[in-house]
Image (tube, helix red, strand yellow):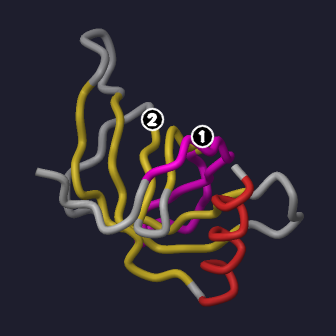
């Protein structure tokens, strides 16, 4: 049974992320898919379900990143050699302007 409220789109954007308690933006990845409700990314170090992150999503058509906060909904290990994997994130906070920019990007993808 599909639980998503919004359809996913295969839009690739660069993402910087950090735990909400961290000061530094050390982690860089790319979206695998994205929607108005969240996104899927690959990570070098698997995160725990429930962890909260701050995100900067770089829209290729705009200089300033989309800023959001998200919660890890699911995490799946995809490599037996390292602790890397994929995570599904649900937006917990995203401003109206950034939501509009995201919607515009999705509509043109």
Tell which of 106 and 93 is nearer to you.
106
Relative horizontal placement of residue 11, taking residue 87 as reference (left or right): right
Numbered tag placed on residue 30 in the rendering: 1
Q: Residue at x 56, y 46 (%)?
A: 27
Tell which of 37 and 93 is nearer to you.
37
Q: Residue at x 48, y 60 (%)?
A: 35
Relative horizontal placement of residue 73, taking residue 16 as reference (left or right): left
Q: Is residue 81 visible?
A: yes
* Secondary structure type for disc 1: strand
Tell which of 30 and 19 is nearer to you.
30
Residues marked 2 and 1 touching at CB (< 8 Å): yes
Q: Is residue 52 visible?
A: no
Q: Quadrant of residue 89?
A: bottom left
Tell which of 98 and 27 is nearer to you.
98
Residue that carries the numbered disc 2 in the rendered image: 42
Q: Residue at x 63, y 73 (%)?
A: 67
Residue 106: in magenta span: no
Numbered tag placed on residue 76 in the rendering: none
Q: Is residue 71 above or below residue 59?
A: below
Point out the tag, 2 or 1, that comes first from the N-terminus. 1
Q: Residue at x 54, y 74 (%)?
A: 68
User: Badge 2: how crowded within 10 Å, few (<14), some, or many (20+)?
Assistant: many
Residue 16: in magenta span: yes
> Residue 46, image x and y in percent?
31, 38
Instruction: State the residue lying farthest toward the bottom.
Output: 96
* Secondary structure type for disc 2: strand
> Residue 62, image x and y in percent?
86, 64
Q: Is residue 30 above or below residue 72?
A: above
Q: Which residues are magenta?
A: 8-27
Q: Quadrant of residue 59?
A: bottom right
> Residue 63, image x and y in percent?
89, 64
User: Badge 1: how crowded within 10 Å, few (<14), some, or many (20+)?
Assistant: some
């Amino acid at each position: 049974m599909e639980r998503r409220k919004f359809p996913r789109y295969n839009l690739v954007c660069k993402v910087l992320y950090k735990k909400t308690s961290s000061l530094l933006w050390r982690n860089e990845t790319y979206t695998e898919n994205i929607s108005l409700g969240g996104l899927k990314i690959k990570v070098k170090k698997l995160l725990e379900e429930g962890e909260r992150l701050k995100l900067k999503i770089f829209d290729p058509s705009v200089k300033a990143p989309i800023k959001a906060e998200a919660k890890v909904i699911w995490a799946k290990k995809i490599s037996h050699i390292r602790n890397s994997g994929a995570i599904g994130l649900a937006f917990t906070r995203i401003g109206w302007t950034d939501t509009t920019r995201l919607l515009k990007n999705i509509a043109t993808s």
